Amino acid sequence: MSDIEAKIRAKARDLWLAEGQPEGRADQHWLEAEALVRAEAEAKPKAARKPRAAAAKKEPAKAAAPVAKKPAAKKESAKKPTLKVVSG
């Protein structure tokens, strides 16, 4: 079952329940639900429904020129004296 069909089915059931569960009106409920679901889908902003392929057609971001890094200055590392444990 497609996503839109599931939405239509749920909306038709809601309409059926709201009318007191009458018998013999399934077709009317389905058609009314279908119209409501399609109207809701069309009312969504177009940016939200933008296809992914169109989004991929955008110009790629221009790469920034590499920035030269300054050479790291050599630091004199002061070695910490190590302690030796002598057991006696």
Image (cartoon, helix red, strand yellow):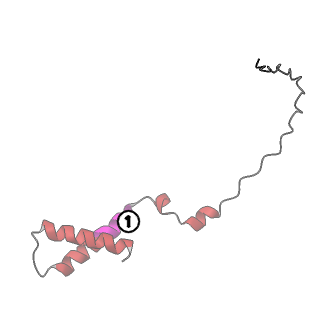
Task: Indicate whether 49 appears above or below 64.
Answer: below
Q: Residue 56: horizontal and vertical position, in percent?
A: 63, 63
Task: Indicate whether 72 appears above or below 25.
Answer: above
Quadrant (top left/top right/bottom left/bottom right) for the N terminus: bottom left
* Residue 7, picture quadrant: bottom left
Magenta part, dominant SS: helix
Would residue 50 appear left or right of 36 to someone viewing this image?
right
Tally the marks.
Answer: 1
Q: Residue 41: horizontal and vertical position, in percent?
A: 38, 65
Residue toward you, 60 or 69? 69
Near mark 1 (Cα within 10 A), the count class, few <14, some 14-19 or many ≥20, is few
In the orientation shown, which residue stands out farthest toward the front? 88
Q: For the point 24% across and 76% down, which residue is it? A: 30
Quadrant (top left/top right/bottom left/bottom right) for the C terminus: top right
Q: For the point 89% across and 22% down, which residue is it? A: 76
Instruction: Give the residues drawn in magenta, as a range.
Output: 36-43
Give the amino acid at mark 1: Ala
Q: Residue at label 1?
A: 41
Q: Residue 49: horizontal and vertical position, in percent?
A: 47, 63
* Residue 10, picture quadrant: bottom left
Residue toward you, 23 or 47? 23
Q: For the point 71% across and 53% down, which residue is it? A: 61
Would residue 55 appear left or right of 80 to someone viewing this image?
left
Would residue 27 appear left or right of 3 to someone viewing this image?
left
Q: Residue 38: horizontal and vertical position, in percent?
A: 34, 70
Q: For the point 18% across and 69% down, which residue is it? A: 15
Would residue 12 appear left or right of 2 to someone viewing this image?
left
* Residue 73, picture quadrant: top right
Confirm whether the magenta stretch covers residue 18.
Answer: no
Residue toward you, 88 or 17? 88
Helix, strand or loop under label 1: helix
